[in-house]
Amino acid sequence: MARKAATPTPPPLAWSSTFHLSPSPPPASLTGDKLLLPQAALENLLEAASQSATTTTTSHDPASWDYVSPHEALSRRNEARQQLPHPLTFRVTNLVTGRVAYAGIREFSAEEGQVVLSTFLREGLALPTITQQRQGEGDAELLEARIKVEAVNVPKGTFARLRPLDAGYEEDWKPILENHLQKNFTTLAVNNILAIPRLSHQPGKDFKFLIDRVKPEGAEAICIVDTDLEVDIEPLNEEQAKESLRQRELRKKAESSSGGQINIDGPKEGTISDGNVVRFNLKTWDRSKPISINVPEENVDILVSTDTIQGYPRLEEWTWARFDGSKPIVILPDDPVIISAKEVRISLRVYEQSLIDSNSKKPMPLPTKFLLSITQTIHRNDNEDEEMADANADSEICSNCKRSIPKRSMMLHQNFCFRNNILCPHGCGQVFKRGTETDHWHCTECKAFGLNTPDRSTYDKHMDVAHTSRRCTSCDYSAGSLSELATHKTTICPNKLILCRFCHLVVPQEEDTNFTAAITGLAPHETGCGGRTTNCHICERIVQLKNMEVHLKNHDLERKSQPLPRVCRNVNCARTTADNNLGLCSVCFGPLYSSAYDPTGQALARRVELRYLTQLLKGCGKSWCTNEMCKTGRANRKPPLPTIPSKEATALVKPLVTKEGLRGGYTSHPLHFCVDETISKRKHLAEMLSFTEDSQGRNGWAIEWCIKAVEVVALEAADELETMNKAREWLEKFAVKRDE
Ligand SMILES: [Zn+2]
Ligand SMILES: [Zn+2]
Ligand SMILES: [Zn+2]
Ligand SMILES: [Zn+2]
Ligand SMILES: [Zn+2]
Ligand SMILES: [Zn+2]
Ligand SMILES: [Zn+2]
Ligand SMILES: [Zn+2]
């Protein structure tokens, strides 16, 4: 279908990198198996190309015949662009699900750190589809997705057999199909499904082909650029086509098993298909008891983490896990990770054969059913107790099979037992019918054992999980086992993602070079990030972000230890007091002041009495006055209060001006003097404030604090609304609430 390949196979490029998936859907121009990588990836690829082009011939000894001067090396690097293999082909791995696809590159125009994948690649990697994304689904998966892209040499293909999966295939489509492949695809991978819109009779739908076989034989994928590819289209019979579609639908359904919130003693059923993960979260549990998480299905792996890692647990990122299908996971209540956790997150997955043998081409297994249950009740094993009781009474333990046997029949039993049963000589404690003991395996490196299945898969899985070294995908740490790697990735790996408490971004935690993380409780990134300074919103002083919490706590302590402000004892007034015998502000006290000698206070009492009587009988004449001890004020009230006749007025005032009445407290014995218009308004605002709640919906502030707040902000505020708002702000920052 194209020119004959003229160039020999280029040397392999050693380049791979891990990317986030671009949050925006792929552009319409990104068709076929194409992806977009960032500019930096091109730089690194060129670097890698120049390495592989020069390493074999470079010497650093100027006397050597193959010495390459730095200048020469640079120009060779510039030539590397021409030396980049054409076409570039990549293996793309979804690190969350382990799914693999093959891809070619469209251009280097993605955002730094991100990869953009075509719809075809997204589907191949079991990522949420564009439609799901538009409907707002799968956001978490998209955010969590980590895509590993590695440059690989894919052999040039000579042959591909496609099988139409929809009815109505027509022979003359072959040229259209070939044209479509040539325009949109760099690679073809076995078992992938091609969806070609132009061939469908129904607009908006795709016509599907399964890539059934390729040559060179045994290749997982082939490159179809610059090759003479022979395309063979072999229709399936109707039955086969239907069956293959049905299988596909089944898998799709299984993929939709959605997980979600789970409760203690509220088991959940579901299905997982190969390569998929079902995720659950547990939000409330009894923190004094152990949590037991179980799935009876032995081939379902359980991965558990808490909110100390971002997202849900993944194959290489978990705190607790079960891979051998044996027992539930039990998390003890004093485990430090669970103590600080707000949420327990569980991922269920089916162990993938592909991890053991990436070339195995077994058909996709059917979805696995599971039943996940979380309990906190501790079951005592009653049977065990019974057996123990038996043993104590009339029975003994058979030295061969370790079962409890009645004493009187022991002879008989052992006669039989030694002939027929064998206790595993390797010490795993299991008893087998003689001759079948070879049906189980023991790990030579640890105490694990298990039953042999025809393909020894449990043994292979044990070796893979427990004794295969793995490299961290994001730093150069190398772990001896999956659990070591998981511990690394969820604790000290510099690239572990954290939600920074200072910049509020999800960022790598960085390397703990000074070993301060354990002491400060701050991730290394946070130590740096928290070293930035800002102005305290209360005292305006410059404070480091990481000290802000303590700084604000001090403000809070200071604030709460303040006494209630002393305010003017005149109920109509809204000023904080000056010191005088009556507890009035200087303005209210002014008219009552006299420099005359008055040791008993009688002259003062007389002046207060006079002022009251003047108010009650003559009135202050001010339009704003609402003082109930003033003739004008009484008339201004709505509804108006009747005028008080002079006799009654004298009687009313008398008790107010006794020694006791004058010395009394603000609330028990208030004074009632007329005030000016400004103060009258302030008092009104302060009263309104004292009836409102604070920002936390609690009881708000006492009138004394409200009076102080209005007094402090009144001069800077343009109108009443602004006064109210500023006073509230001031109260939140500086005042003590009623219930604090
Ligand atoms: Zn026995
Ligand atoms: Zn054994
Ligand atoms: Zn082992
Ligand atoms: Zn690491
Ligand atoms: Zn930060
Ligand atoms: Zn401060
Ligand atoms: Zn006053
Ligand atoms: Zn008045």
Image: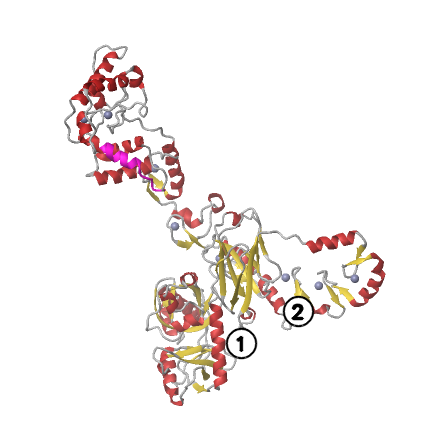
* Ligand 2 contact, mark 2 (Cβ < 8 Å): no
Q: Does the magenta stretch include residue 684?
A: yes
Secondary structure found at label 2: loop
Q: Quadrant of residue 169?
A: bottom left
Q: Position of residue 324 (x, y in %)?
A: 60, 62
Q: Who is closer to the viewer here, 396 or 140?
A: 396
Q: Position of residue 600 (x, y in %)?
A: 28, 10
Q: Is residue 97 left or right of residue 637?
A: right
Kind of residue at disc 2? Asn
What are the residue bounds of the magenta stretch?
682-696
Kind of residue at disc 1? Pro
Residue 215 seen in the figure: no
Q: Is residue 116 magenta?
A: no
Q: Who is closer to the viewer here, 665 or 212?
A: 665
**How far is mark 2 from mark 1, CA to CA?**
22 Å
* 298, above or below 209, in the image: above
Q: Is residue 468 left or right of residue 609?
A: right
Q: Residue at x 19, y 21 (%)?
A: 645
Disc 1 target residue: 363
